[in-house]
Image (cartoon, rainbow, N blue to C red):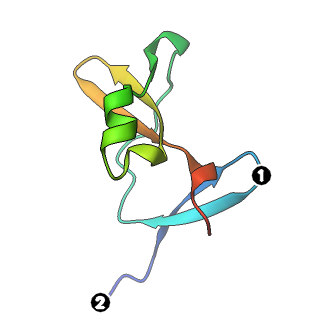
Amino acid sequence: MKNNSRNIVIAKGKEKDFGMVVDEVEEIMRVLNHEIESVPEEISRNTINGKYLKNIINKKDDLIFVIDVDKFSV
């Protein structure tokens, strides 16, 4: 039997909100202010996708990239 369900993540931006269809959501987490870091300039300037990053979250052994939804045109 085929499963036709979809997972949609809603992203809130400054001027617009939109949904993204994702394969799965592995985890929802709380983030403390001190865990949020700026994207290093060498990543934001020198990589193709760096312009879409807003922040990096440093949680123990994991780095989580935060997407800047306002830079997407949908």
Dividing the picture into quadrants, the one containing residue 22 is bottom left
Q: Secondary structure at mark 1?
A: loop
Q: What residue is shown at x 77% (from left), y 52% (from top)?
A: 15
Quadrant housing the C terminus: bottom right
22, above or below 40, in the image: below
Residue 4 place in picture, x, y as percent: 42, 83
Name the residue at the left extreme.
Answer: 61
Crowd tier of the residue under label 1, counting other residues whose Cα lies within 10 Å: few below 14, some 14–19, many 20 or above: few
- The three-letter amino acid code for the residue at tag 2 is Met
Name the residue at the right extreme.
Answer: 15
**Decide: marks 2, 1 in contact (CB < 8 A)?**
no
Dividing the picture into quadrants, the one containing residue 9 is bottom right
Q: Whole-Å distance between the Cαs marked 2 and 1? A: 41 Å
Residue 27 place in picture, x, y as percent: 39, 41
Q: Nearer the viewer, residue 29 or 60?
A: 60
Q: Nearer the viewer, residue 57 or 27?
A: 57
73, above or below 26, in the image: below
First in sequence: mark 2 vs mark 1: 2
Crowd tier of the residue under label 2, counting other residues whose Cα lies within 10 Å: few below 14, some 14–19, many 20 or above: few
Q: Nearer the viewer, residue 51 or 22?
A: 51
- The three-letter amino acid code for the residue at tag 1 is Glu
Q: Which residue is mark 2?
A: 1
Residue 28 place in picture, x, y as percent: 46, 38
- Residue 15's mark? 1
Q: What residue is shown at x 41% (from left), y 28% (from top)?
A: 39
Q: What residue is shown at x 34% (from left), y 47% (from top)?
A: 26
Q: Nearer the viewer, mark 2 or mark 1?
A: 1
